[in-house]
Amino acid sequence: MPKSRLRRRAAYTPPQERLAAVKVGNPRWLVPVMLACFIVGLLWIVVYYVSQTSYPISAIGGWNMLVGFGLILVGFVLSMRWR
């Protein structure tokens, strides 16, 4: 009588450890700083136009526009991190 085939069991592999869930989200400071940059940048430009270059900083003259748009740009950069 022929012998039956032997069944080989797979080697024991322990279950893999589950990794802790990674929190995906915003830091708490992100949204307030982003909105503040948008608002302050907009107000900076509006005050510059309304005051005929005597405010916010009269010493830098036309560079006030760059400061205002720079703040708005920082707001846009922060908005790209918002999830």
Image (cartoon, helix red, strand yellow):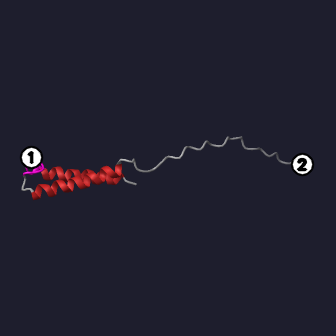
Q: What is the magenta range?
A: 54-63
Is label 1 in a helix, a strand or a loop? helix
User: Can residue 22 be found in the magenta stretch?
Assistant: no
Q: Nearer the viewer, residue 80 or 45?
A: 45
Q: Is residue 38 left or right of residue 4?
A: left
Label 2: few (<14), some (14–19) or many (≥20) C-alpha neighbours in 10 Å:
few
Is label 2 in a helix, a strand or a loop? loop
Q: Which mark is residue 2?
A: 2
Which label lies toward us, 2 or 1? 1
Specify the principal SS of the magenta part.
Answer: loop
Which image quarter holds the C terminus? bottom left
| Residue drawn at 15 percent across, 51 percent down | 66
Which badge, 2 or 1, is on the more N-terminal residue? Answer: 2
| Residue drawn at 20 percent across, 50 percent down | 70
Identify whether 14 is placed above or below 30.
above
Which three-letter amino acid code belongs to the residue tagged 1?
Answer: Ile
Report which residue position mark 1 lands on.
Answer: 60
Which three-letter amino acid code belongs to the residue tagged 2?
Answer: Pro
* Residue 57 position in % (x across, y down): 11, 47
Q: Is residue 72 left or right of residue 15?
A: left
